Image: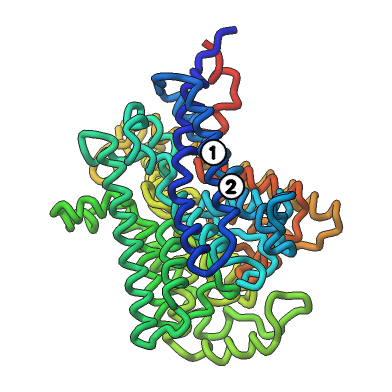
Amino acid sequence: MKLRVDYRASLRLVGTVLKYLAVPLCFPLVVALYYGESVLPFVVTMAVTVLVGTGLERLADEPDIGAREGFLMVAVTWLAVTIVGAIPFLIEAHGIPLLASPVHPESTLGNPANALFETMSGFTTTGATVLGDISFDSHTRGIMMWRQLTQWLGGMGIVVLAVAILPELSVGGAQLMDAEAPGPGIEKLTPRIAETARALWGAYLGLTVLEIVLLYGLNVTGHAPNMGVYNAIAHGLTTMPTGGFSPEARSIEAFSAAAQWVIVPFMVAAGTNFALFWHVLTGDPKRLFRDTEFKSYLGVIGVISAILAGVLFLGDGLTSVAPAGETYDQLYLEGIRTAIIGNVEPAVRQSVFQVVSIVTTTGYASIDFNAWSAPTQYGLLFAMFIGGSGGSTGGAVKIVRWYVIVKSLRRELFTTAHPEAVRPVRLAGRAVDERAIRGIYAFTLLYLVLFFVSTGLLHLDAARIGFDVSILETMSAVAATLGNVGPGFGVAGPMGSYLDFSNGSKLYMVLLMWVGRLEILPVLVIFTPEYWRR
C-alpha cells in the first residue's frame, strides 16, 4: 500500500523546529550563569536539539506540505519538543554519569513520567504540576525559568512562531497554522501567512513585555515587595500564554492585591482573539467591541464573577471547617473568612481573579479555592469547559463554539415551529457554513465523551493503587488537563499537585494535554486508516 502522506516532509519540518529550539534555551542558560548555577542541563539539551533536528532535516530536500502533512508535523512537533524539553529536568535530578553529579537529586522530576508531565504541561500551557516542592531549595533558578519559558513558547504556538521566523516553513504555513492554532480557524490578517504569524507573535510579545514592566513597576513603587525582576519576568512569561506556572508555591496568592489586579486584564487579553489586537493597532479599535465573540466572552466572565462575588461576600461560598488532609488548615480558613466575608474588595477580587483565571484556562490562584464550598467549586468546574476566544492562547471548548451551538439550537427550535423558514446561523453578521457547524458539534461531542471516559479511567486507576480521591477531584483533574486549565480540586488543587497519581495516570494525562492543546481532531485523524491510504 502506497502512503498518501509524505511523512518524510513532515519529519523534516519537525527537525527544523527542534534545531531552532536551541535558541530559546539560551535564556535559562544565561539565568543559570547569572546565579552561578550549572549550565550543563541546557548545554546538553541544546546539543541534542541541534543533532536530532539536523538529522531529521536530511529526510527530505524540499518538503511539499499539504493538510495531511501539516497535521502530522504539528502533532509530532509537540511530542518531540516535550521529550527534548524534559532533558534539563532529568539532568538536574540525575546528572550525567562520569561527567556531572546531580544538582538536586531530590527533585520529583527525576522520574521520567513526572518530567514528561511537567514539560507537556508547560508547552501546552496547562499549568498542572508534579513538583513536590516549588522552591529554589529544590530547583535551580535556571531550571525554574526554563519551566516558565516552555509555557511562553507554547502559548501562541511553537509552529506559528516557526512559520513567522523561518522561511522554509512559510511555504505550507497556512496548513501548519490551521492545524495548530487554537479555535475553529485562524483569521488571515495579511496577504502572506508568515506576516500574519509575525503580527500575532508581535502582539503577544508586546503584551508580555508590558506586563513585565508593570509588575516590576509595582515592586519599585513599593506596592508589590516580592515582585522583583525574576518574578516579574517569570509571571510575564506565563500570563499571556494562559499558562499558570509560578516559581512561588502559593501562586499569585504570594503577591499583593495590587499585583493581582494588574494580572487580571492581561489574563483577559490572553483569552481574547489576538487578531482583534491587530485590528486595534491598525486603526480599527471599534472592531474589538463590535466582535460578537468578544462581547460574549466578557459577558460570561462578568456574570459568573458577579454570582461568585456575592456568594463569597455573604460567606456561603466558603467552608467553615477545614477537613483533615486538605491543602489548607483551620487557621488559613479563618483568615480568609475574616478577610472576605462582608468585605467588597476582597470578595470581588477573589471572584474576578479566579473566574478569569479558570475561564481563560490560565490556572493562576489568588486563593486556595479548595476552601470554597462545594456549589462554588462546581461553578468553577463549569467555567473550566467554557474557554477563551478562538485565536487566543486559551484552552477548553472556546466561547465561539458555545455561541454557535446556542444559536444553532435556537434555530432548530424556530424551524421546528416554522418548517418553511430558511434561517442561517450568523456570527458577526455573516452566515456560518453548515459544515463548520457540524464540525463544532463533532468537536464538542468528542470533547465531552473524552472527558467522561477519562474520568472513569482515572478514577478506576486511583482505586487500583489505593489513592483516595473523590469523583469531583477526578473530574476536575481531567477537565483541567484536557482543557489545559491546570489546577483542579482536592489533591490536584491550586496549592496541591498531581504527584500522587500513578505513573500510568500521569502519562495518560500527558496525552490528554497533548490532544486538548491541538483540539482533538488534528491528533485523532492521524490514527485513522483513511488518513494514510491513497
Mark 1 Cα-neighbour bin, 10 Å: few <14, some 14–19, many ≥20: some
Mark 2 Cα-neighbour bin, 10 Å: few <14, some 14–19, many ≥20: some
Disc ID at residue 383 = none
Disc ID at residue 44 = 2
Res. 479 visible in picture: no
Q: Secondary structure at mark 2?
A: helix
Q: Residue at x 66, y 58 (%)?
A: 92
- The coloring applied to the image is rainbow
Going from the N terminus, do you reach mark 2 or mark 1 first? Answer: 2
418, above or below 60, in the image: below
Q: Secondary structure at mark 1?
A: loop
Question: Which kind of residue does numbered mark 2 sit on?
Answer: Val
Q: Which of the two residues, 440 or 137, is positioned nearer the viewer here?
A: 137
> For residue 488, which quarter of the picture?
bottom right
Rounded to the nearest angstrom, the CA distance separating label 2 from label 1 is 33 Å
Q: Residue at x 47, y 90 (%)?
A: 343
Q: Residue at x 42, y 25 (%)?
A: 67
Q: Which of the two residues, 436 or 2, is positioned nearer the viewer here?
A: 2
Q: Which of the two residues, 34 or 534, is positioned nearer the viewer here?
A: 34
- Location of mark 1 (residue): 520
Residue furthest top in the image? 1
Question: Which kind of residue does numbered mark 1 sit on?
Answer: Ile
Res. 518 visible in picture: yes
* Percent coordinates x, y for residue 105 in the rendering: 73, 62
